[in-house]
Amino acid sequence: MRGVLKRALLAAAIVVGVLVPAFAQSTVPPPNNPNPPIITTRLHPITPLGWFVIGSIGCAAVSPMIGTVILGRELTLNEAYRSTLGCVLGPVGWLLADALVPPTIAVVPFTVTGPNTPNTTPPSKPKREARGRREKPGAGRATPPHAAL
């Protein structure tokens, strides 16, 4: 009986909720609160210079990321400046980058291994024998129970 009553009450609540509109979905605007005007057209389109600035900023943001992925390491400041100037000024930026930050070679530290390299691990200590400190025969064994009597 209880389950039937719950289902009937739930069905009634759904029907009443569907038929009565919510207050937030009112179709009549409240008084003294006009709707804002709808603007459907742009007054000023983006100029070619605006597109150049947008593209330069995007290129300057993304090119160091792409360079890092391609090289597989973090870019040096020199490389980051060069890619940024190349994005903003194009070929003039390449020449300006050569004048401002001279090209250098990034050195990645690595270890050299081969037959002529010195051994960097310390030599292992030789095993030492115990001189005169040998255990007596039977010293480590447990005493049999009948020997204690």
Image (tube, grey):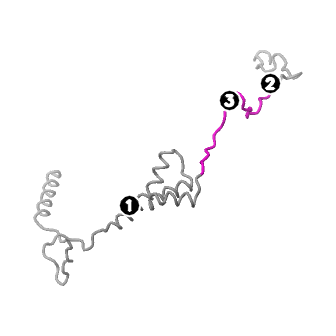
Q: Is residue 103 left or right of residue 118?
A: left
Q: Give the amino acid at mark 1.
A: Gly
Q: Give the amino acid at mark 2.
A: Lys
Sequence-wise first label, 3 or 1: 1
Q: Residue at x 15, y 53 (%)?
A: 7
Label drawn at residue 127: 2
Where residue 137 appears, as percent x and y from the top left, is 83, 16
Q: Quadrant of residue 110?
A: top right
Q: Give the amino acid at mark 3.
A: Gly
Q: Secondary structure at mark 2?
A: loop
Label drawn at residue 114: 3
- Residue under label 1: 55
Which is in the foreground here, disc 2 or disc 3?
Answer: 3
Where residue 106 appears, as percent x and y from the top left, is 59, 48
Which quarter of the rendered picture does the C terminus lie within?
Answer: top right
The answer for how far apart the CA atoms under marks 3 and 1 are is 50 Å
Sequence-wise first label, 2 or 3: 3
Q: Residue at x 14, y 58 (%)?
A: 9
**Is 19 drawn above or below residue 110 in the view shown?**
below
How would you classify the magenta stretch by its main secondary structure?
Answer: loop
Q: Residues within 10 Å of mark 2 (few under 14, many from 20)?
A: few
Label drawn at residue 138: none
Q: Is residue 23 left or right of residue 67?
A: left
Instruction: Tell me which segment is drawn in magenta.
Output: 104-126
**Is 13 drawn above or below residue 119 in the view shown?**
below
Q: Is residue 107 left or right of residue 115?
A: left
